[in-house]
Image: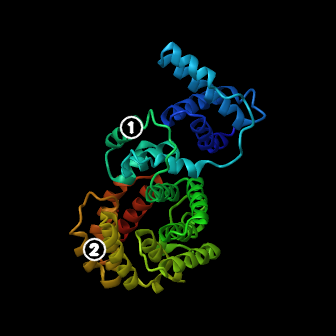
Amino acid sequence: MDETLLRALVPTVIGVLVRRGAPFAAAEDAVQEALVKALTSWPDDPPAHPRAWLVTVAWRSFIDASRSEGARRDRELRLELEPEPGAVSDADDTLQLYFLCAHPKLTSSSAVALTLRAVGGLTTRQIARAYLVPEATMAQRISRAKRTIADTRLTEPGDPATVLRVLYLVFNEGYSGDLDLAAEAIRLTRQLASVSADEEVAGLLALMLLHHARRPARRLPDGTLVPLAEQDRSLWDTGLIAEGVDLLQGALARDRLGEFQAQAAIAALHADASRVEETDWVQIVEWYDELVRLTDSPIARLNRAVAVGEADGPRAGLAQLDELDPALPRHTAALAHLHERAGDRRVAAALYAQAAGLASNTAERDHLMRQAARLGQSAGLA
C-alpha cells in the first residue's frame, strides 16, 4: 500500500467533508478513522478510486460520530442531510485549507500551529521546535485551537500573513529532512503567487527557491551533511537560482520590504558567490540588520552574529553571541564555529561535542561530532 498516496489525499478529503458541512475538527477526526481502515483493508483489497473511497468512509465516520453524540432528533436530521454518493472533484484543496485554518477566531500563533498539525503533517514536537517552546506547551495550544473552532463551519478565510508563516515553517521542516515536504511548500507558494501580487508572497517563493537550489549539494550519497562553505557549488540548480533572483528583484523594486524578502536577499548573496571566499559578508550583515529591525527575532540575531564573525573577524562575532541567550537553538554550534575561526581549537572541539548533544536531527548531530573529532585529533585530544 502506498502511504505517500494516503498522506497526499488527506487535505482534499478533509476539504470535501468541510464543504459538506462538517466542522473542521470533526472532519479531521473522521479522516483519521478512514485512514486507519485504509491501512487495514487496502493491502488485501485496494480500491479502484482511493479518493472516493476515503471520502465515503470518512463521511460515514463523521455521521456515526454525530449520531452518537447528539440527541435523536439531531441524529435524524444529520442523516437526512447526508449527501448522496457522487463524483469527487480532483481539485487540490490544500491551499484553501491553509486559509480556512487561519480562522479569524484564532490568534495567529494558534492558527499556524493548528494548520501545521492538521494540514501540513508536522508532529507536535516539530512544531514546538520551530516555535522554541516545550512540546507540552505546543500540544495545549493546538488543543485550544481545535476547541475554539470545533463547532464552527470554516467558511471565512483567514489572514494571508498567517498562511505565509505556515508555508515558511513547513518548508523549513522539509528543508531539514523530508524532501517531499519542502517541495509541497514550494508548490503551494507557487499557487499563491499566481493569484497574489503581494511582495512578501514573491519574497517567500524566492527564498524557498534559492534554498532549494542548494539541496543537491547539502548531503553526500551516504546522507552526510555538507555545510554551505564546503558544498560543491556546481551541483546547485542555476535555474532555480535565476528564478528566485528574478522574483526577489521584482519584489524589492516595489519598495515595501518584509522579512521574507530580507531573508531571500541573504540567500541570493550566498547564491551569487561562485566560491565561498567571494561571499559578500558585509552586505549579508546589512541585510541581517534589516531582518532584525523587521522581526526582532533571536534566531536572526544569532545568524547575524555569525555573519559579523565572517565580515569583521571571529572575535567580533563572539562579542555579538555573548549578548544572546545561550539556550537558543544552534547557539553552541555557532560558538564552536567562531572559536575555531579564532584559532581556539580545543575550546571549539569541546563546544562542537556539546552542540552535537543538542542537535535536533541525526544528520546534524553526526556532522557536529565529526567536527569535534577532527579538531580533537588536530589538537592532540584524541
Q: Quadrant of residue 282?
A: bottom left
Question: How many neighbours does mark 1 have within 10 angstroms: few (below 14), some (14-19), or many (20 or more)?
Answer: some
Up the image or down, 209 lies above or below 253; here it is above
Amino acid type assigned to the residue bearing label 1 in the image: Thr
Counting residues from the start of the chain, the first of labels 2 and 1 encountered is 1
Q: Left or right: where does residue 54 sit relative to residue 170?
A: right
Q: Secondary structure at mark 1?
A: helix
Query: Label 1 belongs to which residue?
Result: 148
Query: Label 2 belongs to which residue?
Result: 344
Front residue of this view, candidates 118 and 275 = 118
Examine the rendering and report whether any part of residue 143 can be seen. Answer: yes
Examine the rendering and report whether any part of residue 379 can be seen. Answer: no
Residue 69, percent across and down? 47, 19
Question: How many neighbours does mark 2 have within 10 angstroms: few (below 14), some (14-19), or many (20 or more)?
Answer: some
Residue 192, percent across and down? 57, 61
Say which residue appears at 47% left-offset and 54% top-offset.
Answer: 166
Up the image or down, 127 lies above or below 214; here it is above
Q: Quadrant of residue 294?
A: bottom left
Say which residue appears at 66% left-offset and 33% top-offset.
Answer: 54
Front residue of this view, candidates 259 and 242 = 259
Q: Quadrant of residue 233?
A: bottom right
Residue 141, percent across and down? 35, 42
Amino acid type assigned to the residue bearing label 2 in the image: Asp
Q: Left or right: where does residue 340 sit relative to residue 247?
A: left
- For residue 243, the mark is none
